[in-house]
Amino acid sequence: MNFYSLNNPEHRVGFKEAVIRGIAPDKGLYFPERITPLPTAFFDEIESLSYQEIAFTAIQQFVEEDLPAEKLREILDQMLDFNFPLVELEENIAALELFHGPTMAFKDVGARFMAHCLGHFFEGGKEEVTVLVATSGDTGGAVANGFLGVHGVQVVLLYPSGKVSDIQEKQLTTLGQNITALEVRGTFDDCQTMVKTAFLDQDILEKRKLTSANSINVARWLPQLFYFLFAFKQAKTKGREIVFSVPSGNFGNICAGIVAQKLGMPVSHFIAATNSNDVVPRFMQTGKYSPKISVATISNAMDVGDPSNFIRIQNLYKNDFTLLSRYFSSYSFSDVETKSAMKKVYDTSGYVADPHGAVGYLGLTTYQQQHPGSYGIFLETAHPVKFLPVVEETLGIVPEIPIQIQKVMGKEKKSIPISTYEDLKSLLIKN
Ligand SMILES: *Cc1c(COP(=O)(O)O)cnc(C)c1O
């Protein structure tokens, strides 16, 4: 299967090339040439299939030229070693918990898959690749963890000093080996600017092959479609039409869900729930796409002012606004609404939602008011302890710290402080 650039359908590369490049030379996102629906028998018998079997069947068509079946099975076995439970909160509402992985955020699956792919592509060779990532929190932790010890890959993470949570900082800075954490005196935007500059800097590119690990990369984006199939496996017996509500920032996760729909999974509607960064909800109301500078919220992994994957979503619905509106809605919620949803969920069902999950819950209940009768699944994308201060303050409880987090909290932080782009450049050229 080839992937083409959304800026130029003539530019086509295989899966391996798309993963190594991340983005096409014309800055277009890579998009699969075809999405061939799976046989209906697959969906008929999905309850009897393991997570690994489901994942294998779903992703094989996209990767088969560059990942032989045996290698793909091996990767999926190693990567899907935790659970994705669907927890029913009300008669027609369930949370799909995606936070049982090593860093307790849903990005673990995509990061692990991408790490295994790069590890395979560079295995045994002399060449090395450097994954350069700016992170405001969860991405860095998942990437660092996924790539730890992967041969042929160096990871360099940039994070803004003092602006990530204690837990997140520990997840970024305590791993060692092939992971280097750079603590930037500045904001997340400064980190991101430095990374973008490095990708265009010939002096660096002569020394290193650079790639990124955000959801633009097809190896991080596509495996997220597994979640929706895993949810379907668990919810199918309800015998009702299924709708998904996905807390969205760069819209990679929900976009992968739409790929699952294209593969033939019965789902009647997708709801993209956002915080006050409402570019997409506005687009759905006005038909006009106007990116904005992001504003800070309590669901900070979704503070995105120009979601990179929305163009892929439009493409999946043939760039047809009427078709898009039939299957896709988007709503925005303030921090005040998010906190009161956290309280409501806790009071009615005893469930502790993190701020991102709470935004997903709000999207779902808003949609269901007009469309009762559906079985609604919202994605719970991070464990509540990752947003401890908000959870404690809003619910008045102290959640138990899970073992993954306890382990990392006791380790020693190792980071290299940097202030300017020149600092980054000399580090990348030197090592
Ligand atoms: C990244 C992230 C999101 C947003 O996912 P997108 O694919 O960027 O829309 C939501 N919740 C959490 C906890 C995240 O880390």
Image: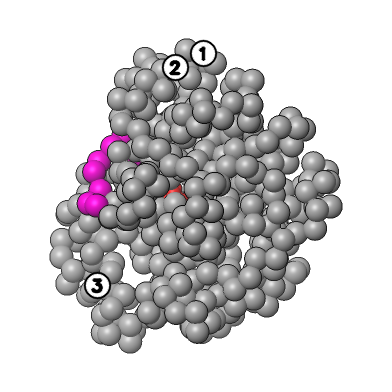
Occupied quadrant, residue 299: top left
Residue labelled with disc 1: 348
Disc 1 vs disc 3: which is toward the camera?
A: 1
Please tell me which residue is depicted at 69% across the width and 49% down the height of the picture: 265
Dots 1, 3 in contact, CB < 8 A = no
Occupied quadrant, residue 248: top left
- The image quadrant where one finds the N terminus is bottom right
Disc marking residue 344: 2
Label 2 sits on a secondary structure element that is helix
Residue labelled with disc 3: 197
Ligand 1: does it lie within 8 Å of the C-beta at label 2? no
Please tell me which residue is depicted at 24% across the width and 59% down the height of the picture: 191
Q: Reading the chain from its start, which is encountered first: label 3 or label 2?
A: 3
Query: Is residue 225 in view from this perspective?
Result: yes
Disc 3 vs disc 2: which is toward the camera?
A: 2
Please tell me which residue is depicted at 57% across the width and 53% down the height of the picture: 258
Give the overall secondary structure of the magenta segment: loop
Observer-nearest residue: 196 or 255? Answer: 255
Dots 2, 1 in contact, CB < 8 A = yes
Say if 358 sits above or below 45 in the image.
Answer: above
Q: Amino acid at mark 3?
A: Thr
Bounds of the magenta segment = 291-301
Q: Residues within 10 Å of mark 2 (few under 14, many from 20)?
A: some
Residue 109 x, y percent position in the rendering: 56, 52
- The image quadrant where one finds the C terminus is bottom left
